[in-house]
Amino acid sequence: MRIPESLAKQGKERIKDYPVEGFVYGEGPDNPVIMLVGEAPGETEIHNGIPFSGRAGKELMQSLEFLGLTRDDVYITSAVRSRPYKWGQKKDRKSGEMIDRKYNRAPTAKEIVAHAPILDYEVKNVHAPLIVTLGNIGLQRLAGKDKKVTQIHGQLLKQPVQYLETMDDTKFKWTEEDYEIFPTFHPAAIFYNRSLEEKLKEDLEKLKKLIEERGLKQKN
Ligand code: URA
């Protein structure tokens, strides 16, 4: 599934006044085993156009392997499709001089709203039997601001998801139909907090069971 070019163009236009760069399309088949919803692309992704292809992506591919899945089995997207950045300084290793560089940051509420029509379209058209949110940004974008990944990771939610009814709206509405959402941690969270590794492993075991029980993917 690839979003229509007109929607991508609109998304780029809606976010152009914010400090973001690049645009990465969601990627995956029409009827994936699961849909993965992350936060926003990073530097690697905006250069090669492949979602979750950087350091977090490597971690995510290990999780998929544990689930018996590959990149081709899943639809990968995120709340925001451009890289949110902030300027900072870093010491140049050779010269010792301080140089300006861009650092990743979490997307703001306005940036999430700017790209909401894109994720709304994907949720509606990808037909994933299960949506796996990676971290708080993806979880709260779909399931509501009151949800916290640390509190509900590994618990299957069955509920409406948030969407923008019109392009001019700044507040989300709730869909009439329910979706199944499985919240877990963002793969990059593991880098900053190794104690999450065990919890992620437990979540993946539950997710693997769910996938198998429902026959979403043949056991291997
Ligand atoms: N984090 C995301 O949410 N998406 C990417 O593509 C990379 C990192």
Image (tube, helix red, strand yellow):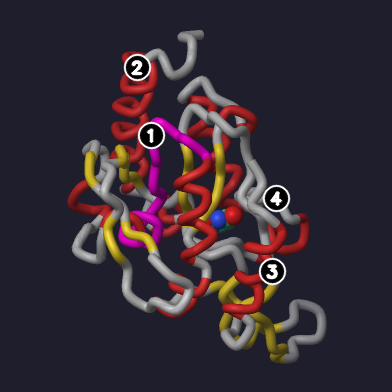
Crowd class of label 1 (few under 14; some 14 to 19; many from 20; radius 10 Å): many
Q: Position of residue 122 (x, y in %)?
A: 52, 49
Which is nearer the N-term, disc 2 or disc 3? 3
Q: Which tag, 3 or 1, sits closer to the chain's start?
A: 3
Q: Amino acid at mark 1?
A: Leu
Say whether disc 1 or disc 4 marks the residue closer to the N-terminus: 4
Q: Is residue 194 above or below residue 86?
A: above
Task: Give the residue number, with chain letter if any, for mark 2.
Answer: 214
Residue 29, above or below 171: above
Label 4 crowd bin: few (<14), some (14–19), many (20+), radius 10 Å: some
Cα distance, mark 4 to mark 2?
29 Å
Q: Are marks 1 and 4 in contact (CB under 8 Å)?
A: no
Disc 1 element? loop
Reading the image, the residue beneath label 4 is 50
Task: Give yes or no for residue 45 being in the magenta stretch.
Answer: no
Provide the secondary structure element on which disc 3 rests.
Answer: helix
Looking at the rendered image, the quarter that the N terminus falls into is top right
Would residue 106 be visible to someone looking at this image?
no
Alpha-carbon span between mark 1 and mark 4? 22 Å
Asked whether the beta carbons under mark 2 and mark 3 sit within 8 Å of each other, the answer is no
**Residue 4 in sight here:** yes
Q: Is mark 1 within 8 Å of ligand 1?
A: no
Q: Is residue 110 above or below residue 58?
A: below
Look at the picture and state if 68 lies above or below 135: above
Residue 59, position in %: x, y? 54, 42
Stretch in magenta: 126-141
Residue shown at the point (51%, 56%) measured from the top left: 78
Image quadrant of ligand 1 equals: bottom right
* Foreground label between 2 and 3: 3
- The circle on residue 9 is 3
